Amino acid sequence: MENKAESKGQRIAKVMAAAGLCSRREAERWIEEGRVAVNGTVIETPATLINERDSVEVDDKALPQVQETRLFLYHKPAGLVTTAKDEKGRQTVFDALPKELPRVVSVGRLDMNTEGLLLLTTDGALARYLELPATGLARTYRVRAHGKITQKQLDKLNKGLTYEGVRYGAAKATLEKQQGTNVWIMLSITEGKNREVRKMMEALGLQVNRLIRTAYGPFDLGKLEKGAVQEMRTDMLRKRLPGYFKKGTS
């Protein structure tokens, strides 16, 4: 049943995200920068409510129609930055994606030198839902780092830690093997702070030299080849994210 807030319209930032143009956070920033107009008037707040009768323009271009919620699994290679446009001219994830893909936004980011699973979606609201720490989705990584460590030392991460003035939440780490001067570790986190895995390893005296994300919540990299993209079937997407679709947030 439609609630009273929805009957008056939807927040402009949510509509922009649902159109796959950007994430809600990016939409809010664009609005603050004066790039968004409703019915010919530049708006100043992302709390602005609009309905289907309103005309929305971003950078003087009509807002794309809201797209069906779709999710893609992408095996990101190292060397690509996760941004729509890089000020340093480096190749981005979006430069490397197949041209036939619809307009998508990334679910969070992977550092330039991090490989593995990156989720892409046509629905910016879904991207935000998947990113939020409150959603509680684990990000799982295989970590290769220079140095030596024991499982007992890794178990200290169960309670989280503070490093260089930043508090990192609890993490689950399993020692896989020692290989020469390197060690392989399987690590799961739920916060996704900037360079979180690398910083946590540094706090334990390890220097990460390879980082591969193998899973994000219920989505797994599996045998997806490097650089390849695979779409998640709609029925499977709804089955794996019942909390999102039952709330009608799509």
Image (spheres, rainbow, N blue to C red):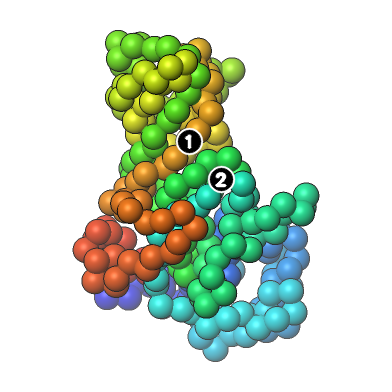
The residue to which callout 2 is attached is 78
Q: Residue 177 falls in which quadrant of the image? A: top left
Element on which disc 1 rests: strand
Question: In the image, residue 241 lies at what x, y percent?
Answer: 27, 59
Q: Quadrant of the N terminus?
A: bottom left
The residue to which callout 1 is attached is 211
Give the residue displayed 49% in from the left and 79% down from the top.
66
Q: Residue 22 falls in which quadrant of the image? A: bottom right
Q: Amino acid at mark 1?
A: Leu
Tell me if 136 is positioned left or right of 19 in this view.
Answer: left
Question: In the image, residue 244 lies at what x, y percent?
Answer: 31, 61
Question: In the image, residue 2 lies at what x, y percent?
Answer: 32, 75
Element on which disc 2 rests: loop
Give the residue displayed 73% in from the left and 68% down from the top.
35
Question: In the image, residue 149 lies at what x, y percent?
Answer: 39, 12
Q: Could you tell which of marks 2 and 1 lies nearer the N-terminus?
A: 2
Establish if 77 lies above or below 183: below
- Residue furthest right in the image: 88
Query: Is any part of residue 160 visible from this angle?
Result: no
Give the residue displayed 52% in from the left and 26% down from the top.
208
For the image, the number of numbered tags is: 2
Mark 1 surroundings within 10 Å by alpha-carbon count, few (fewer than 14), some (14 through 19), many (20 or more): many
Q: Quadrant of the C terminus?
A: bottom left
Q: CA distance from mark 2 to mark 1?
A: 9 Å
Q: Amino acid at mark 2?
A: Ala
